Image (spheres, coloured by chain):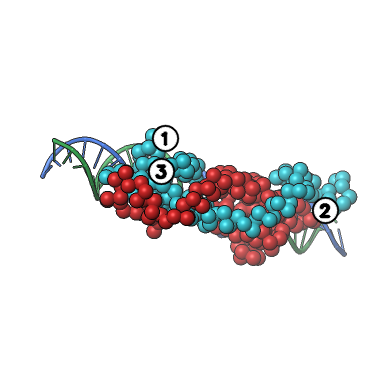
Chain colours: A cyan, B red, C green, D blue
DNA sequence: CGGGTATATACGAAAGCAGATATATTAAGC
DNA sequence: GCTTAATATATCTGCTTTCGTATATACCCG
């Protein structure tokens, strides 16, 4: 789970994954699509491979990379306990909770007296 | 999306999130539960807050942190296109797929390089 | 106001990670 | 065997992130 998230957290690797979502790709195709150096592509593919997110098959000198479904299923399973949580909360309070810095608002309701 | 994944990729922060899944926690409670220094906890909470994963409310000197549902919904939505993919693949076997695509001549010398 | 508590921020050091260049591996075709 | 093509690995450099320690802020109570 950790390695899955860590692998996907990198923007370039996320792009690779989204490329592979459509169909398997050779390294050279990825290199061209993302316009980046070949060693970098190989390196990112290695991280993805070690995280179990992709697998490769050899075709002569080329390697065809494709997504493996398991990590995505794991992510989906991991999300399960949170699903209940968000569906329950989205009905009420939606607009209220949106600000990241809710401290000011919270102070008012916590102290219940308001002005400073 | 990226910031959500990046925030969750850190093992400590993932633990914090799983703590908060059960119920909101004060900083001190998290500190004690994870047995780590207070400044570190605050710092991780800041990353989570800036990623929109948690929000806090003030209660006297204490701050109560709770999960925000939105990022989890986004993750769930992001997974959507992959769901079809994995359910389609889990029916048949992975080895089966290789023979299906035998026109690639990959099968002859194919060596699956899965995760390690 | 002063002291204690809870949390946040600043800052320096160490570690981890992405990018670039150079080199190694493996297979193909002549 | 030699050359070229496709991909992988090694190494260095710089950047980002994390940990630790010290300090600042905000709040409560007497």
> Disc 1 vs disc 3: which is toward the camera?
3
Most foreground residue, B36 or D25: B36
Instruction: Report in which chain the residue with disc 3 lies.
Output: A
From the image, which quarter does the N terminus of chain B lie in? top right
Image quadrant for the C terminus of chain B? bottom left
Mark whose residue sits in front, 1 or 2:
1
- For label 3, count other residues whose C-alpha is less than 10 Å away and answer few (under 14), some (14-19) or many (20+): some
Residue A63 lies, in percent from the top left, at 33, 45
Q: Secondary structure at mark 3?
A: loop
Q: In the rendered structure, which disc, 1 or 3, sits on the residue that comes first in sequence?
A: 3
Q: Are marks 1 and 3 on the same chain?
A: yes
Chain ID at mark 1: A
The residue located at (87%, 47%) in the rendering is A114
> Is the residue B64 above or below the residue D2 in the image?
below
Which badge, 2 or 3, comes first in the chain's sequence? Answer: 3
The location of residue A15, given as percent across then percent down, is: 48, 40
**Which residue in the structure is indicated by mark 2?**
A110
Q: Residue B17, located in which quarter of the rendered image?
A: bottom right
């Amino acid at each position: 789970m950790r390695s899955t998230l860590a692998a996907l957290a990198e923007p370039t690797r996320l792009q690779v994954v989204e490329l592979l979502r459509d169909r398997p790709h050779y390294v050279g195709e990825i290199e061209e699509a993302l316009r980046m150096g070949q060693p970098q592509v190989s390196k990112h593919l290695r991280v993805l491979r070690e995280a179990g997110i992709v697998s490769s098959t050899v075709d002569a000198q080329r390697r065809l990379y494709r997504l493996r479904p398991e990590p995505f299923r794991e992510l989906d399973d991991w999300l399960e306990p949170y699903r209940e949580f968000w569906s329950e909360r989205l009905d009420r309070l939606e607009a209220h909770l949106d600000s990241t810095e809710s401290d000011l608002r919270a102070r008012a309701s916590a102290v219940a007296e308001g002005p400073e």
